[in-house]
Amino acid sequence: MMAIMDAHEAQRDLEEARLSYNVSVQPPLPRWAPPLCGLLIAAAVALAGLAPQGIWWRLAALAAAAVLAVLARAVVLAIRTRQGVRGLRGPARKAQAALATSALAVFVVSLNTPGEVRWMYVAMGVAAGIIVWVTLHKKTRS
């Protein structure tokens, strides 16, 4: 009976340590950050696909989309800096690497997007915006 109680206590302590670590490397966000970042990412993906056919206009639209995506990242990093967390550690570093790879893929593919499938970028933008919003909402202050 005592061994079972010790195992439960150890499990609870381990979970508390994990939670403490996660909060230290990914502090809670204010409530306004998730919707703002979600909208910026949605606009970036949609703009990448809706770029006009001319190469210079397409490059300009992709540059504007990249600025929107970088702005979303800058918002989160600025909040983290104000909370005393500098740089990316642990799960935040892994998440940023995955996001950068995904963003690069979206922008490279959007360079040759035919006009018939541009609507898919709007749908992908909405989906990406919702995913970012929900994911960051899980990290907001209670």
Image (cartoon, rainbow, N blue to C red):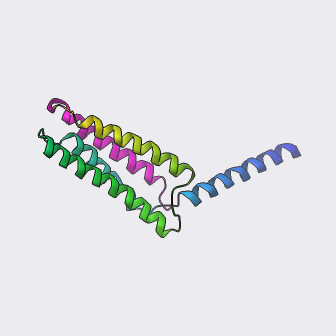
List the single residue furthest toward the left: 54
Residue 90 position in % (x across, y down): 57, 51
Whether residue 79 appears in this view of the structure is yes
Q: Is residue 14 left or right of residue 120?
A: right
66, 29: nearer the viewer:
66
Residue 9 on the magenta span? no
96, 11: nearer the viewer:
96
Residue 119 on the magenta span? yes
Residue 95 position in % (x across, y down): 48, 46
List the single residue furthest toward the right: 2
Picture residue at 41% right of the left edge, 44% below the top: 99
Quarter in which the N terminus is drawn: top right
Vertically, is 19 above or below 131?
Answer: below
Picture residue at 29% right of the left edge, 40% below the top: 107
Task: Specify the principal SS of the magenta part.
Answer: helix
Q: Is residue 126 left or right of residue 4?
A: left
Vertically, is 30 above or below 13?
Answer: below
Q: Is residue 3 left or right of residue 103?
A: right
Tell me the magenta residue range. Answer: 115-142
Vertically, is 139 above or below 62?
Answer: below
49, 42: nearer the viewer:
49
Picture residue at 80% right of the left edge, 45% below the top: 7
Picture residue at 44% right of the left edge, 48% below the top: 135
Residue 67 position in % (x across, y down): 28, 54
